[in-house]
């Protein structure tokens, strides 16, 4: 009797938590990022189940004083954002955009927010590093 009561309470809670974790993973954007002498560019693809299909590009400028190691969990950093639709090729720059990193290395994981003329976008990302060949020589 006691076991059935516990299972009745635990099973719905488990299913509720599991369904939210699946939903959160499906809205995360995937893609790649690359670096050069002046900063990093993140290429985020649209989530599979989203309406408009396209890419969101975030450009983070940086100096040697504030390099990638300082970005993790410190706060929000201003970025330049541009979204481009795949079907029409039409691109639009954001009026305001920010990014926050939780992990930065072979993979960059974090959150973003971008304000465009007609809508506000925010979400999470999990992108992998794409090495350019030949490497940039920064002076």
Image: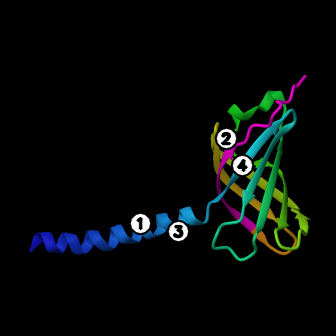
Q: Element type at marker 3?
A: helix
Residue appearing at x 71%, y 49% in the figure? 32
Residue appearing at x 81%, y 27% in the figure? 65
Disc 1 to disc 3, how far (Cα)? 9 Å
Q: Residue 5: image x %, image y %?
A: 17, 74
Residue appearing at x 71%, y 77% in the figure? 51
Q: Which residue is mark 1?
A: 18
Q: Which mark is residue 23?
A: 3
The mark that comes first in sequence, 2 or 3, is 3
124 relative position to 97: left or right: left
In contact (CB < 8 Å): disc 1 and disc 3 = no
Q: Element type at marker 4?
A: strand
Which span of residues is magenta-colored?
Answer: 121-139
Q: Look at the picture and state if 74 lies above or below 125.
A: above
Number of marks in picture: 4
Q: Nearer the viewer, mark 1 or mark 4?
A: 4
Q: Is residue 123 magenta?
A: yes
Question: Residue at the front extreme?
Answer: 133
Disc 4 to disc 3, how far (Cα)? 22 Å
Question: Residue at the left extreme?
Answer: 1
7 relative position to 46: left or right: left
Residue appearing at x 77%, y 42% in the figure? 34
In contact (CB < 8 Å): disc 4 and disc 3 = no
Q: Which mark is residue 74?
A: 2
Disc 1 to disc 2, how far (Cα)? 29 Å
Q: Is residue 110 magenta?
A: no
């Amino acid at each position: 009797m006691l076991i059935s009561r516990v299972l009745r309470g635990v099973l719905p809670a488990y299913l509720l938590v599991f369904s939210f974790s699946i939903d959160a993973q499906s809205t995360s954007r995937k893609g790649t990022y690359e670096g050069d002498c002046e900063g990093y560019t993140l290429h985020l693809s649209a989530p599979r189940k989203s309406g408009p299909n396209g890419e969101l590009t975030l450009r983070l400028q940086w100096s040697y004083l504030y390099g990638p190691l300082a970005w993790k969990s410190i706060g929000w950093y201003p970025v330049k954002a541009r979204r481009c639709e795949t079907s029409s090729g039409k691109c639009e720059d954001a009026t305001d955009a920010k990014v926050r990193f939780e992990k930065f290395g072979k993979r960059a994981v974090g959150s973003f927010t971008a304000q465009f003329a007609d809508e506000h976008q925010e979400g999470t990302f999990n992108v992998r590093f794409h090495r350019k060949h030949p490497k940039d020589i920064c002076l």
